[in-house]
Amino acid sequence: MGTQKIAELVSLFLTVPTVILAATVVFVWHKSAIRSLMHKPRTGTDWLIMGVAISFIGSLVDNLFWGIVWTAAFLESDKTIDLFNIGVFFNIFFRQLAGICAGFCHIKSATTSAPLSKLTRVISLVSIGNIFMGVLFTVCLLYIKYNGR
């Protein structure tokens, strides 16, 4: 068995406890997350709890889906390419958007009860800047793809 197959097998081994632990965290925190979502005005703790729940829901679904895909690849299934192709949709919702929402919640948690400080202003600028960087990166990709290298 080659290095690639060994790495796939190790990844699949690690996927099982990752999924189980993520599901456990979601189960343990779901009531607190729902309470935090309904609580007005939200405290820093509410934002932190929501961020934890969102990140682990995303991790649970993401790892479950990619565990299925990599299992198919390891077993050399003829469905592997189809699964890889739909993977981008899982990435959008359960990796990128869940990560963005969880990150927002964690930043909001850190800045909710703190006075407007230099750190808070830097975090706000980074948050706005990352949207600009995402747009710039996408525009560059489109330019390269359609106008040559």
Image (cartoon, rainbow, N blue to C red):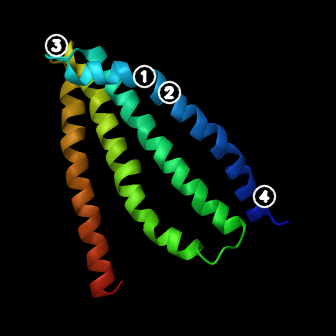
Q: CA distance from mark 2 to mark 3?
A: 31 Å
Residue at position x 53%, y 34% from top? 22
Residue 120 image position (x, y, % from top left)? 21, 24
Query: Tag 4's secondary structure?
Result: helix
Q: CA distance from mark 3 to mark 1?
A: 28 Å
Q: Is residue 110 visible?
A: no
Residue 25's label in the rendered image is: 2
Q: CA distance from mark 3 to mark 4?
A: 51 Å
Residue at position x 34%, y 35% from top? 102
Residue 114 image position (x, y, % from top left)? 21, 13
Ranked by sequence position, the earlier of labels 4 and 1 is 4
Q: Is residue 96 visible?
A: yes
- 4 and 54: which one is in front? 54
Residue at position x 24%, y 39% from top? 126
Ranked by sequence position, the earlier of labels 3 and 1 is 1
Query: Tag 3's secondary structure?
Result: loop
**Residue underneath mark 1:** 29
**Residue underneath mark 3:** 115
Q: Which amino acid is tagged 1? A: Trp
Q: Of discs 3 and 1, which sits in the foreground?
A: 1
Identify the residue at the far right of this view.
1
Residue 77 is left or right of residue 145, and the answer is right
**Residue underneath mark 4:** 6
Q: Of discs 4 and 2, which sits in the foreground?
A: 2
Q: Which amino acid is tagged 2? A: Val
Quadrant for the C terminus, please.
Answer: bottom left
Residue at position x 45%, y 30% from top? 26
Disc 2 + disc 1, Cβ < 8 Å: yes
